Structures are given as structure tokens and as C-alpha cells.
Amino acid sequence: MQHSEQFAFIFDMDGVLVDNMHLHARSWVELFCDHGLKGLDPGRYLRETSGMKGLDVLRRFLDPDITPEEACRLTELKDFLYRAMYRKEIRPMAGLEKFLNSAASLNIRLGVGTGAGARNIDFTLDIPGFKNRFQAVVGSHQVRHGKPHPDIFLRVAELLGTDPARCIVFEDAVAGIEAANTAGMKSIALTTTNPKEIMQACPGVIAVIDDFTTVTPAEMLEKLCVAQP
């Protein structure tokens, strides 16, 4: 697919489209506790591994030699617990629906690049406000390497037909910011997972926001143009 001159916005899912990272952290902690790792601070998961594949999370905290098959089984258990906790609460991030409408009116292409698996992607993108919004969606199960590697974001850009330099990534995790920067993309960081001062210090970040209520797509494009050489 050839690149066009259009811009694209690529959104991480958890902590960006929806404000749910506290529940992912809780579900991981419950899983770890059930497997003998007690007393883990949910904040440590958020700081060290949020945005990563389940395999990488489990190898960091539970067993460095865990097989991909066992990691997949445990990640599915964790994800079921997460969905059960969040099912009645799930809603778009504040201001996001208006932001997406404005982006679409400017012919900005919209994609999702997430470390989540297929079931969690379907769970989130099926809620009102997200159906048929995104022209490309790529999850961790569709690439060889998850974040902080750039594979997910590069694949979304390829599917959207947009040059990476004309993409803005919206991310809440340090690993995701690193992935975007390695992919040659600038980032807008959200403070749903990490404090503002941490996100501001990450390479490639051109703005830090709490949610989408006080920003517009046009402003984000202006920041991208100013940041580029």
C-alpha cells in the first residue's frame, strides 16, 4: 500500500481509549497472588510492564522460563477477571468521542495499536462510541514483538497507508512511548498510568494530556508540524 499525504492518529487502547489500567493492574495482582507471588504493588506493574504482552509481564514477575503456551493460558485467565470487573463500567475516555468526530471531519486516518489480545480488543471496541471508528486495528497477537518494539505501530501505519512521520501515537505507557519513538512517530502522552513528569521526559512526546476534553485534533497536528525538522 502506498503512503498518502494524509495524517493518522494511532491510539493505544487500554488507558487511552478507556480509563481502565487500574483494573488491569488489579487483575494481574490477583493472578500473581493465586500463583504464590503475594504483596505485589499494582503500581509496580503499571510502571514496569504496562502495555507489554502477557508473556513479557509473566516472565518479568512470575517465571522467567514460562512457556508461551502457559503464558497464554494465564493471560486468558487474567483477562477474563479483568472483563468481569469492568463490564458494567466500561465507557470511552472523557472527551474522546468528540475528538474522534473532529478528527474524522479533518480526514485524519484513525487506527488502534494495542498490546491487548483479540478478546479484549473485541470487548472494548464493541462498546457504543467505538464501532466502525478505526480503519486499522492491530493487537499483540498479530505481530512478532510487542511494545516496546515498534512492530505494532508500524503495522498500523502500513495498514492505514500513512508514513510513520505523519502519525501521532496516543499512549499512556512508557513502553508504548518507546515503541512509537522507535517507529519514527511522535506521541501524545496521557497521564492515566504515569504522572506527567515521567511522560514529559520520554523521547518523542510532544504533549501530555489528562484526557481529551481540552484538546483538538487540529492542535495536535500543529504540535506535530512544529516538532518535525
Image (tube, grey):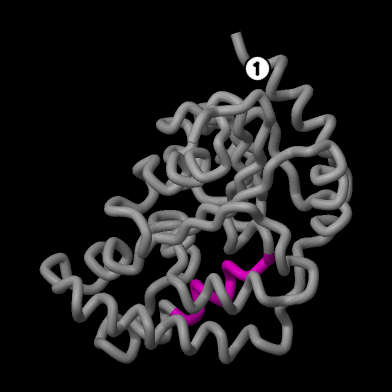
Quarter where residue 193 is shown: bottom right
Using the image, determine if residue 38 lies above or below residue 210.
Answer: below
Using the image, determine if residue 175 lies above or below residue 224.
Answer: below
| Mark 1 surroundings within 10 Å by alpha-carbon count, few (fewer than 14), some (14 through 19), many (20 or more) | few
Question: Badge 1 is on which residue?
Answer: 227
As rendered, which of 207 and 97 lies closer to the eye? 97
The part of the chain drawn in magenta is 18-27
Q: Residue furthest left?
A: 65
Instruction: Give percent across and percent down for residue 97.
Output: 83, 59
Residue drawn at the location 68% of the way across and 66% of the way down: 19
Residue drawn at the location 48% of the way across and 61% of the way down: 46
| Residue type at numbered disc 1 | Ala
Residue drawn at the location 64% of the way across and 70% of the way down: 125
Is 90 part of what is drawn in magenta? no
Q: Is residue 94 left or right of residue 1?
A: right
Residue drawn at the location 61% of the way across and 45% of the way down: 10
Instruction: Give percent across and percent down for residue 170.
Output: 63, 45
Instruction: Give percent across and percent down for residue 50.
Output: 45, 59
Using the image, determine if residue 62 lies above or below residue 217.
Answer: below
